[in-house]
Amino acid sequence: MVKKSKKELKNCEDLILEYEDKLQKLKEKASIEKKKIDAARDANRSIHLEFSEWQPSVKHFIGESLLEESLHPDL
């Protein structure tokens, strides 16, 4: 009985080590994915800021183009 319990304990300890290893690998993957998400957010923020700078001039250009088109429909 004691021998069987020791064997079961050893199996449980081995499983714990296996799951700890799997957990560590998952943590590493999660860290990599978080870095990717952060990089994507930074890129998105940069694009948004760049677009915000261009937005007034683009709106003005579109407005002028539409005005010009309405004044000279044959162009």
Image: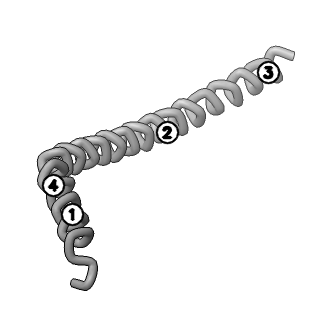
Amino acid on which the number 4 mark rests in the picture: His
The quarter of the picture where residue 45 lies is: top left
On screen, residue 50 versus residue 45, left or right, reads left
Other residues around mark 3 within 10 Å, as few (<14) / some (14–19) / many (≥20):
few
Check disc 3 and report the residue beneath it. Answer: 3
Q: In whole angstroms, how far apart are the C-alphas of marks 1 and 3?
A: 92 Å
Check disc 2 and report the residue beneath it. Answer: 26
Q: Which of 1 and 18 lies nearest the eye of the viewer?
A: 18
Q: Which of 62 and 25 lies nearest the eye of the viewer?
A: 62
Q: In whole angstroms, how far apart are the C-alphas of marks 4 and 2?
A: 50 Å
* The N terminus - image quarter: top right
The first of marks 3 and 2 along the sequence is 3
The first of marks 4 and 2 along the sequence is 2
Check disc 4 and report the residue beneath it. Answer: 60
Q: In whole angstroms, how far apart are the C-alphas of marks 2 and 1?
A: 58 Å
Whole-percent x, y for residue 20 in the image? 53, 30
Disc nearest the viewer among 4 and 2: 4
